[in-house]
Amino acid sequence: MRREERKTGKLVKNRGFTDKLYFYNFCTVHILMAAILTITALGGLLGLADLSPLGSIPQWAYTELGIHTGFVIWKAKAENARKYPAGRDGAAKMGAEKADDETKVVEDVMEDF
């Protein structure tokens, strides 16, 4: 086994369940797209007359991948908001005036979410 393969294996192995699931989902969708492209390209040689059912598969595959991507981003945002509450950790190290100004900015930004 080559070094690159070992490194990739470690990257996937050391990740959480959601990250592994997303990685496998991403790979599966792209393998499916490659299979559809191959079937379409070789459709004449394989004797396939109607390839229209293959036209709806990519939209469903990429829709599912997009929903999964949205979930992963939402989950990361929720975890970061829980880990790093807005304006609390850095306030003790800065001057009170500067900390108040930055807390206001952070609160304004967090309202948009």
Image (tube, rainbow, N blue to C red):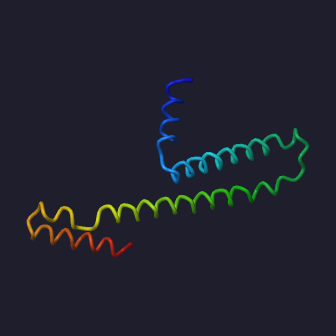
The location of residue 49, given as percent across then percent down, is: 90, 50
The location of residue 70, given as percent across then percent down, is: 52, 62
Residue 56 vertical placement versus 40 (above, below): below
Residue 2 vertical placement versus 86 (above, below): above
Q: Residue at x 91, y 43 (%)?
A: 47
The location of residue 72, given as percent across then percent down, is: 49, 59
Q: Residue at x 35, y 65 (%)?
A: 81
Q: Could you say which is closer to the camera, residue 91 or residue 46? A: 91
Q: Residue at x 57, y 60 (%)?
A: 66
Left or right position of 36 against 44: left
Q: Residue at x 12, y 60 (%)?
A: 93
Give the number of marks. 0
Residue 57 vertical placement versus 9 (above, below): below
Q: Could you say which is closer to the camera, residue 35 or residue 70? A: 70
Task: Assign the N terminus to one quadrant of the image.
Answer: top right
The location of residue 4, given as percent across then percent down, is: 50, 29
Task: Assign the C terminus to one quadrant of the image.
Answer: bottom left
Left or right position of 51 against 72: right
Left or right position of 58 against 48: left
